[in-house]
Image (cartoon, rainbow, N blue to C red):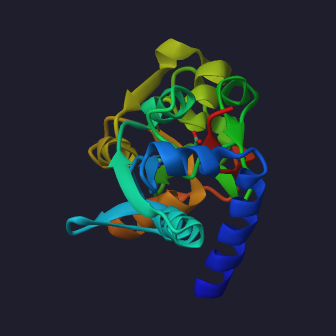
Amino acid sequence: MKKSICCIALALVMALSTVGLFTSCAKEKEKTLVMATNANFPPYEYKDGAAFAGIDVELAQAIADKLGMKLEIQDVEFGAIVAGVESGKYDIGMAGMTVTEDRKKQVSFSTTYATGVQVVIVKEGSAIQSPADITTSSKIGVQQDTTGDIHCSDDFGDDHVQRFNKGADAVAALVSGKLDCVVIDNEPAKSFVAANEGLKVLDTAYAVEDYAAAFAK
Ligand code: ARG
């Protein structure tokens, strides 16, 4: 893992440095690389006690190390990351973030470093056995402003989607019977299912996406 984090970090540094981002932010931010993330998305970013941990955190640390910069992590709402990167408040957004055409209008993306799959979590024994079984009468939970939110709002209408601040809160609502399913990225889905009894991830994917780091145009 260490080796692959380093290789990915090097590729990202090379991709990002072609646009001169880090030469300018190194001057302006006194060699601090400010990363915006939303740290409730294991294994990409989460809190381990008071410390930040996860794949994106390790990647950003490796990028900062390569650039000789100190890494500062800002844990913000997921929906605030793109706008904050766009306005220059943060140097880089890393949050298991899917490259989308809309986001590309606001920020630039690095080369992609992982595939993310939107999956459906249900209770064991649920009538929903594949994404095709979800209807407008299903109670669907998502993390606000994520691609799960965007896809489900497009497919079933805004009013049919319940938005939560954190994926874990959507999963808690599923466990307590307030939802029929949660649409979320596969890796956090696996950890939420492992942490809660009686849940499963459906075999059929909802959507397949690419993750990349976001930075100002
Ligand atoms: N991949 C999805 C998206 O880009 C979800 C990312 C959520 N990330 C997070 N750190 N909460 O919309």
Quarter of image, res 46: bottom left
Taking the spot 51% from the left edge, 25% from the top edge, the residue there is 87
Q: Is residue 144 visible?
A: no
Count the numbered circles shown.
0
Between 196 and 39, the one nearer to me in the picture: 39
Taking the spot 66% from the left edge, 32% from the top edge, the residue there is 107
Between 102 and 154, the one nearer to me in the picture: 102
Q: Is residue 148 visible?
A: yes
Taking the spot 50% from the left edge, 71% from the top edge, the residue there is 58
Q: Is residue 87 left or right of residue 9?
A: left
Taking the spot 53% from the left edge, 34% from the top edge, the residue there is 85
Q: Position of residue 115 (x, y in %)?
A: 72, 58
Which quarter of the image is occupied by the N terminus?
A: bottom right
Q: Position of residue 89 (x, y in %)?
A: 44, 33
Q: Position of residue 105 (x, y in %)?
A: 71, 23
Q: Position of residue 191 (x, y in %)?
A: 44, 66
Q: Is residue 175 left or right of residue 202?
A: left
Residue furthest to the left: 50
